[in-house]
Image (spheres, grey):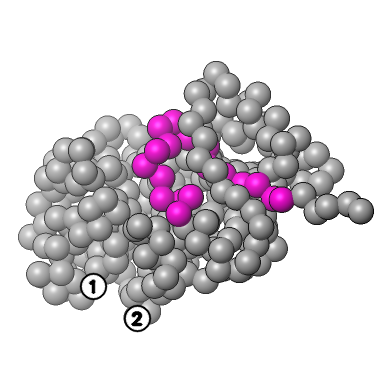
Amino acid sequence: MSLTPIPLAGVIGSPIAHSKSPQLHGHWLMTHGIQGYYIPMDVAAEDLENVIRTLPKAGFVGVNITVPHKERVLDMADQVTDRATLIGAANTLIFLKNGQIHADNTDGYGFIQNLRQNAPDWDPKAGPAAVLGAGGAARAVVTSLLDVGVPEILIANRTRIRAEALQSEFGNRLTVVDWVQAGNMFEDATTVVNTTSLGMLGKPPLRVPLDGLRKGALVTDLVYAPLRTRLLVEAEEMGCVTVDGLGMLLHQAVPAFERWFGVRPTVDSAARAAALR
């Protein structure tokens, strides 16, 4: 009698001990009664390709990819989705039965689903968005905001040239603002997003002046440690609608789990509690 192999998945990054994905996927595996495992793997850059080529032979159906490997894995994939190509990075690999590697990026999907779930009255077309940061996370955010109809994006980054690179790629719907003037972006913005690590535990604070925030604007921070960043606390005090960054992590995991394990999980209070455990 032949036994069905136990499906394995995981997350690759360096460092990786801080990742909340193992708790989240472990919760979903248990909830749906799936005999599978999700394993965190700290992999150095020089070992990345060798590890990824080996994993399918060890029973892995796919992996998540996080910092600093999201860009590099695109070169290892046989198939790359349009959104991963546009963002220039992948956070999800699916190991196909024919031996090929399929690369996708679900960060933008997770970002938008988080806003739709936790700020259901948010209208992306209501006015400009202000985005702080121009790194990999910002690329996913900008792509998804343009997709849902935000008319204009004002973007500021500590290194202006990175913001200008995004503007040259995404066109005249992006306007670059000097970092020292970043607070001025908020006066017209109906959506405000911090994609930088500023304000995260162990990182420098976000020192951008917030007095220009509009009452009723949606303000979200991709930082989720702490859950309530200074940006969110002050924005709420000023009458803004605020959404923390944990939901993006939860929602970006949904399509990957479905592809790997054949069940579409639900982002609910139990999933959130599992990630915070």
Residue at the farthest bottom position: 121
Q: Closest to the observer: 95 or 26?
A: 26
Residue 121 image offset from top left, x and y in percent: 34, 81
Residue at the farthest right position: 1
User: Which residue, given by chain and number where applicable, does mark 1 sit on?
Assistant: 241
Q: Is residue 181 visible?
A: no
Query: Within 10 Å of the Cα at label 2, are there few (<14), some (14-19), or many (20+) other Cα atoms?
Result: few
Please give left or right for residue 43 compared with residue 78 in the image.
left
Residue 216, picture quadrant: bottom left
- Residue bounds of the magenta highlight: 6-23
Amino acid marked by disc 2: Asp
Amino acid marked by disc 1: Val
Please give left or right for residue 163 compared with residue 9 in the image.
left
Residue 55 image offset from top left, x and y in percent: 68, 35
* 233 shown above or below 96: below
User: Which residue, given by chain and number where applicable, does mark 2 sit on?
Assistant: 121
Asked if residue 5 lies in the magenta stretch, the reply is no
Dot 2: what SS?
loop
Q: Are marks 2 and 1 in contact (CB under 8 Å)?
A: yes
The residue at the point 77 percent across, 49 percent down is 5
The residue at the point 7 percent across, 60 percent down is 211
Residue 29, picture quadrant: bottom right
Please give left or right for residue 15 compared with residue 39 in the image.
left
